[in-house]
């Protein structure tokens, strides 16, 4: 396929100054109309400036949307298998540059290299999966109720899709949105999180290198009110996909509804892990540590509540706390580091405030609870892995999403009591049960109110070929990943072909 090439570099700079990155609009790298920029800082060491990015405004969004609208007229007519071939080539390129992109991501986001390599891998996995969907955009064929008449349904693209993505998975989550959208024939305007724009740039540049035509994906960087809201409000944006907090998601959904836009909201979580008396205790402890402190607890699926049956409660707590205290906290670029910093000062302060709230509420602080600010820590946003025990399920630390390395441990009497505690929250994203009893496992799969349930694994670890999302205030029912993403980025058209050569009136001209 013949493609247009980019006419300008996305950045400029030299060895003594940070790179300056521009917006991508209609295949060109452009400065924002505001003339303003912002710094992308390393949360582990704020002396390290990853780059300078455009602080965009409404005019930049409008230009990007117009470019996407023009590109849609041609892109939707490209056969889906050809669109998918570009995505497949991008997957290959992602893996070739996996370590480079992982280091960029660790610098801008803070999580350890093992996790950022996994983030890039997830984007590649999504690309491979969605490339296959280019030859499988299936629709049903069905018998007509009338003779000499053919009936079927086909998937059509939605149009221009606006995307607002978070900072915790700065390449994986953009890939969940962009790749199914373009395979289905849509064009896109994406605003990456202001804390982590570089990883989205890396993903989109790979797609351009793989042959994506200009205007199919456009990037506008900046902050929510100035650059995010205009995407949602623009009348030429046909669908909006947002991942972030439930509070902001409510505003996005309300604004999108004004113009009847398709809207996918992936929001917060307060995810419980239940451990019963018969569980493999070693496995449960390692799962809880990984689920609670992986990505510094900055996952919508993080294991923020652990509900323990009383027969093993004290044994679990002692061993879990001992393991948490040994976690090595530091700069994620060090391969020995197990937990990195909070993403920014605001998140660090939020973590610290909830550590104080937990103590005021009467929960017992077993470890952590403080900022790390001595030595090299002084340049970053580090907090201790924190564990509260004897937590009442109604306490704020057991009900509200913290998005940090704070785990609340709650005792329970058994499975029924545990599930009642687990379900007693406004969220419903991910749940987990550790047991060797298959009957209890199946009861939990049925009765836990969530979009995801793991058995003998923590609440994190979703795979790209299954639908991802939750219930209650975790979202509005749409799913990312797998066929759920295809469902969101397409709309059905019913097609009838009458080859009887006469007027046939459905439900009226029936042979009695």
Image: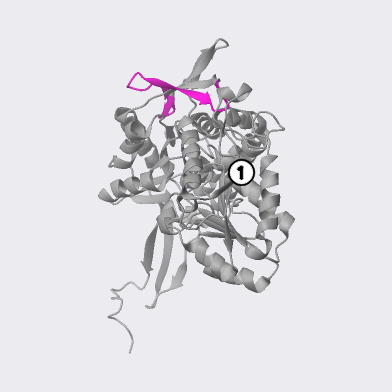
Disc 1: CA contacts within 10 A as few (<14), some (14-19) or many (>=20) = many
Point out residue 499 in the picture as x, y percentages from the top left corner.
Answer: 37, 70
Point out residue 242 in the picture as x, y percentages from the top left corner.
Answer: 41, 45
- How many marks overall? 1
Residue located 50% across and 50% down the image: 362
Residue located 53% across and 41% down the image: 404
Quadrant of image for the C terminus: bottom left
Q: Please indicate whether residue 500 sits to the left or right of residue 447 in the image.
A: left
Q: Please indicate whether residue 457 sits to the left or right of residue 352 in the image.
A: right
- Queried whether the magenta region covers residue 27, the answer comes back as yes
Relative height, residue 177 to residue 10 (above, below): below
Relative height, residue 16 to residue 281 (above, below): above
Displayed quadrant of residue 87: top right
Provide the residue designation for mark 1. Answer: 293
Q: Please indicate whether residue 152 sits to the left or right of residue 272 in the image.
A: left
| Residue in front for this viewpoint, 284 or 123 | 284
- Queried whether the magenta region covers residue 103, the answer comes back as no
């Amino acid at each position: 396929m013949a493609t247009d090439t980019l006419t300008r570099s996305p950045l400029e700079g030299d060895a003594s100054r940070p790179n300056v990155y521009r917006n991508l609009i209609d295949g060109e790298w452009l400065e924002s109309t505001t003339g303003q920029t912002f710094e992308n800082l390393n949360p582990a060491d704020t002396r390290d400036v990853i780059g300078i990015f455009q602080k965009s405004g409404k005019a930049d969004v409008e230009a990007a949307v117009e470019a996407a609208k023009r590109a849609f007229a041609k892109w939707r007519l490209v056969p889906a298998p050809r669109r998918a071939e570009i995505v497949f080539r991008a997957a290959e390129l992602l893996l070739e540059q996996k370590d480079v992109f992982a280091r960029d991501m660790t610098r801008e986001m803070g999580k350890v290299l093992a996790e950022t390599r996994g983030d890039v891998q997830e984007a590649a996995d999504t690309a491979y999966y969605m490339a296959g969907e280019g030859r499988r955009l299936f629709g049903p064929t069905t018998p007509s109720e009338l003779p000499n008449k053919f009936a079927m349904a086909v998937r059509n693209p939605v149009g221009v899709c606006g995307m607002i993505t978070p900072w915790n998975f700065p390449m994986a989550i953009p890939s969940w949105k962009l790749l199914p959208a373009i395979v289905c024939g849509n064009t896109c305007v994406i605003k990456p999180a202001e804390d982590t724009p570089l990883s989205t740039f890396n993903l989109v540049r790979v797609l351009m290198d793989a042959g994506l035509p200009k205007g199919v994906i456009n990037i506008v960087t900046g902050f929510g009110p100035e650059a995010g809201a205009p995407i949602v409000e623009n009348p030429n944006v046909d669908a909006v996909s947002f991942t972030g907090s439930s509070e902001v998601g409510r505003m996005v959904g309300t604004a999108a509804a004004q113009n009847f836009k398709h809207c996918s909201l992936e929001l917060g979580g307060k995810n419980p892990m239940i451990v019963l008396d018969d569980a493999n205790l070693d496995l449960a402890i390692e799962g809880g540590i990984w689920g609670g402190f992986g990505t510094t607890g900055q996952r919508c699926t993080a294991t923020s509540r652990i509900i323990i049956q009383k027969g093993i409660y004290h044994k679990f707590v002692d061993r879990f706390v001992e393991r948490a205290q040994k976690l090595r906290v530091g700069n994620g670029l060090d391969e020995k580091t197990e937990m990195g910093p909070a993403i920014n000062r605001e998140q660090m302060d939020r973590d610290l405030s909830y550590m104080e709230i937990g103590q005021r509420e009467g929960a017992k602080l077993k470890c952590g609870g403080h900022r790390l600010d001595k030595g090299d820590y002084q340049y970053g946003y580090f907090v201790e892995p924190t564990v509260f025990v004897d937590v009442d399920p109604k306490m704020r630390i057991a009900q509200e999403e913290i998005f940090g390395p704070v785990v609340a441990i709650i005792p329970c009497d058994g499975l029924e009591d545990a599930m009642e505690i687990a379900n007693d929250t406004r969220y419903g994203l991910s749940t987990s049960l550790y047991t060797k009893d298959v009957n209890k496992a199946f009861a939990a799969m049925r009765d836990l109110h969530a979009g995801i349930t793991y058995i003998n694994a923590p609440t994190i670890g979703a795979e790209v070929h299954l639908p991802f999302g939750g219930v209650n205030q975790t979202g509005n029912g749409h799913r990312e990943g797998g066929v759920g993403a295809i469902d969101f980025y397409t709309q059905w058209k019913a097609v009838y072909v009458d080859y009887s050569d006469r007027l046939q009136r459905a439900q009226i001209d029936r042979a009695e």
